[in-house]
Image (tube, grey):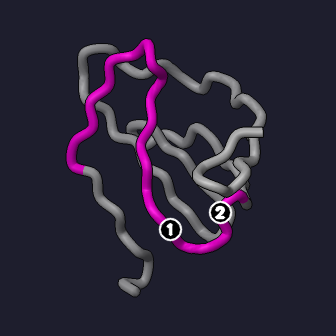
Amino acid sequence: MRKCGTVPLQVLPRMPRAGAVPAGAWSTLAVNVKGSLFEVLLNGSKLYDVEDTTFPDAGKVGLWTKADSVMGFDDLRVVVAGGK
């Protein structure tokens, strides 16, 4: 079982490939979260709706990429709905 610190991670099923990420160009990735529901969008187009209850309490944000890819992240923003 995989863990993050001491918390066991829920292994989500592999999602089908929803579209190609353009090479050599910046893209916008958005993740909208409400409770345990995650809506994932790439360049404004919805890719997935996923439910994950691994971390039920508010926490941190992390970015990850596969080891064999070259990825850059810029302008990371976290916005809380309702301004709270």
The span picked out in magenta is 54-75
Residue 59 position in % (x across, y down): 50, 68
Query: Is the residue under label 2 in contact with that under label 1 (CB below 8 Å)?
Result: yes
Residue at left 72%, top 29%?
14
Q: Main secondary structure of the magenta part?
A: loop
The dot on residue 81 is: none
Residue 48 position in % (x across, y down): 63, 42
Crowding at mark 2 (Cα within 10 Å: few <14, some 14-19, many 20+)? few
Residue at numbered disc 1: 59
In the foreground, 53 or 51: 53
Q: Amino acid at mark 2?
A: Phe
Disc 2 secondary structure class: loop
The quadrant holding residue 80 is bottom left
The residue sitting at the front extreme is: 6
Residue at left 36%, top 69%?
79
Residue at numbered disc 2: 55
Verify whether residue 27 appears in magenta. no
